[in-house]
Image: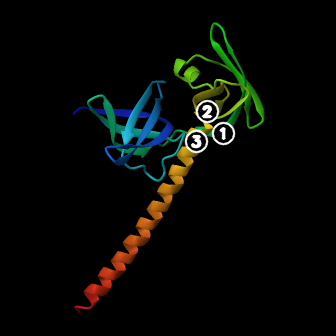
Amino acid sequence: MEEEKITGYITLIEPRTRRGLIEYRLRIVTLGGERLTAYIRELPPWLKLGTPADITAIYAGDRLLIDRISRKSGLRELRVAPTIIDEITRETFTVVSGRIDNKFFSIPILDEYLVSRLPDKVPSKVYSIFSESEGGLRIFEFISEREYRIFTNARRILNKIIGNEKRMNEYVKGLLEDYVKGFD
């Protein structure tokens, strides 16, 4: 199997089941603007929306499976914020107007994928993953409130599981140490 090296931002994390096991579908926007979907069985604790990452993945059929993932140093994380979309104008190209952090914005959306993620009704609340620079606002992803809640609840559950695993491991380690001491 051929490895593929990817550097980009994680713009969506969706928990799902496949063959009775939990996996996560990650949407990645590469530094060149390409959108990829990849799958991972276990999320690293540091991974969150907007995180820059270095990824090594392999293709299994048409699915891109993550073999290794690490946080990419030298790149700032993208911001995630509630966004009110007040107006969507669809003419030669789509222009979205609204508010992020009570600051007004109006930008063209040229990416057809992002256009497809816009809400049907306005005004509407979504979450956006974006960067701000001297060049202006760049939106990488729109996430519905429902998708955002699913992600945050899944993250909360995962953190509880990790915490319980650590406590369980410490408990078992203590039991084993006591058991071995019994033979001294």
**Residue at the spot 42% in from the left edge and 49% down from the top edge:** 43
CB contact under 8 Å: marks 3 and 1: no
Residue assigned mark 2: 130
Q: Place residue 180 in its image quadrant.
A: bottom left
Q: Which structural element holds mark 3?
A: helix
For residue 81, the mark is 1
Position of 87 compared to 171: left or right? right
User: Is residue 165 positioned above or below 181 on the image?
Assistant: above
**Residue at the spot 49% in from the left edge and 24% down from the top edge:** 33
Position of 44 compared to 128: left or right? left
Residue assigned mark 3: 148
**Residue at the spot 40% in from the left edge and 71% down from the top edge:** 168
Please state which of residues 72 and 140 is positioned toward the viewer in this rendering: 140
The residue type indicated by label 1 comes to Ala
Position of 167 compared to 137: left or right? left
Residue 161 location (% of width, % of height): 45, 61
- Image quadrant holding the C terminus, namely bottom left
